[in-house]
């Protein structure tokens, strides 16, 4: 299927805007600040929204710190890619739902990261606010993102050298937002050559500017991989896509 230049540009600009206005950071095991029932309901609503849009793959973000602590223009603290997938419940039943593919900071090595798959309740468990950022790419972009993840190319794009603030114009360090951007660019340019991806980013896109002074208050663990009771992954959270959607 042919993808128009306008479609690519819209999808990429949306994601670059999203990426460069998100202060990214992640680590393991953050306590919930909301009642479990609230988190379950919110996660279910996010899934319902995405499924209602026919999304097989989308970019998802959460708020891991109080909004008052974030610099002006920063709305989210963690981004990832969600795929409509076969999910095995704790009782062994196989169902359909969204799996979320994250880059998270290692708890024992703060300068290193790992790729972790979790689910909507896990994703929002330690969120400061029950607010989500959702970007649904074009269908063709979704297909390419699915290929990036299901063929393991996302692992090829992973740089384990972690920093809460990383420059997406080079491959020196990486955080969750940059990894998400790298996956999107890999889908667009159909390559996992990091040098080429970074060259294209430098050549064609300009990030939003956020001053060091504004960021200084946020150079801490600003969002974390969440830990919650396994029982929370229940069938009622999972939302089928419209039957007419070819997945």
Image: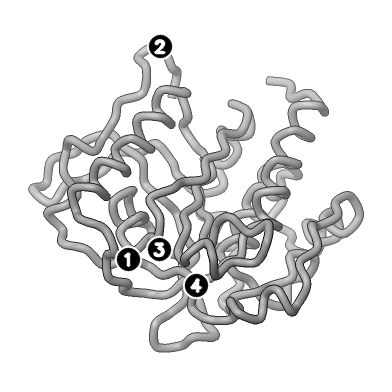
Few, some or many residues within 10 Å of mark 4 (<14, 14–19, 20+): many
Residue plotted at (54% across, 44% down): 59
- Residue found 36% across the figure and 56% down from its top: 123
Question: 156 or 215, which is in the foreground?
Answer: 215
State if disc 3 and disc 2 touch (CB < 8 Å).
no
- Read off the residue under disc 2: 244
Q: In the drawing, does residue 187 fall left or right of residue 147?
A: right
Label 2: state its secondary structure.
loop
Q: CA distance from mark 2 to mark 3?
A: 31 Å
Point out the image quarter for the C terminus.
top left
With respect to residue 98, does 173 lie above or below?
below
Residue 60 rendering spot, x and y as whole percentages? 50, 47
Of residues 66 and 91, the one nearer the viewer is 66
Residue picked out by circle 4 = 222
Identify the residue shown where x is 72% and y is 50%: 191
Q: Earlier in the sequence, mark 2 or mark 1?
A: 1
Q: Nearer the viewer, mark 4 or mark 1?
A: 4
Disc 1 from disc 3: Cα separation: 11 Å
Rendering coords of residue 30 (x, y %)? 32, 72
Q: Nearer the viewer, residue 174 or 1?
A: 174
Mark 1 — residue?
226
């Amino acid at each position: 299927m042919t993808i128009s230049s306008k479609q690519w540009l819209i999808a990429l600009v949306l994601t670059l805007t999203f990426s460069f206005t998100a202060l990214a950071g992640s680590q393991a095991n953050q306590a919930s600040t909301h009642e479990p029932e609230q988190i379950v309901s919110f996660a279910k609503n996010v899934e319902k929204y995405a499924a209602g849009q026919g999304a097989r793959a989308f970019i998802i973000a959460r708020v891991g710190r109080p909004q008052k602590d974030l610099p002006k223009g920063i709305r989210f603290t963690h981004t990832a890619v969600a795929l409509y997938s076969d999910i095995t419940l704790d009782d062994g039943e196989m169902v359909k739902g969204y799996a979320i593919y994250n880059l998270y900071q290692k708890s024992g090595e703060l300068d290193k990261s790992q790729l972790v798959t979790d689910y909507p309740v896990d994703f929002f468990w330690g969120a400061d606010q029950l607010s989500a950022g959702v970007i649904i790419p074009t269908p063709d972009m979704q297909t390419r993102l699915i290929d990036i993840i299901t063929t393991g190319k996302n692992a090829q794009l992973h740089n384990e050298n972690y920093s809460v603030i990383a420059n997406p114009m080079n491959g020196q360090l990486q955080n969750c937002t940059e990894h998400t951007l790298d996956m999107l660019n890999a889908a667009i340019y159909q390559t996992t050559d990091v040098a080429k991806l970074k060259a294209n980013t430098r050549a064609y896109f300009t990030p939003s500017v956020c001053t060091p002074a504004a960021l200084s208050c946020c150079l801490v663990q600003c969002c974390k991989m969440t830990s919650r009771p396994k029982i929370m992954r229940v069938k009622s959270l999972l939302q089928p896509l419209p039957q007419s959607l070819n997945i």
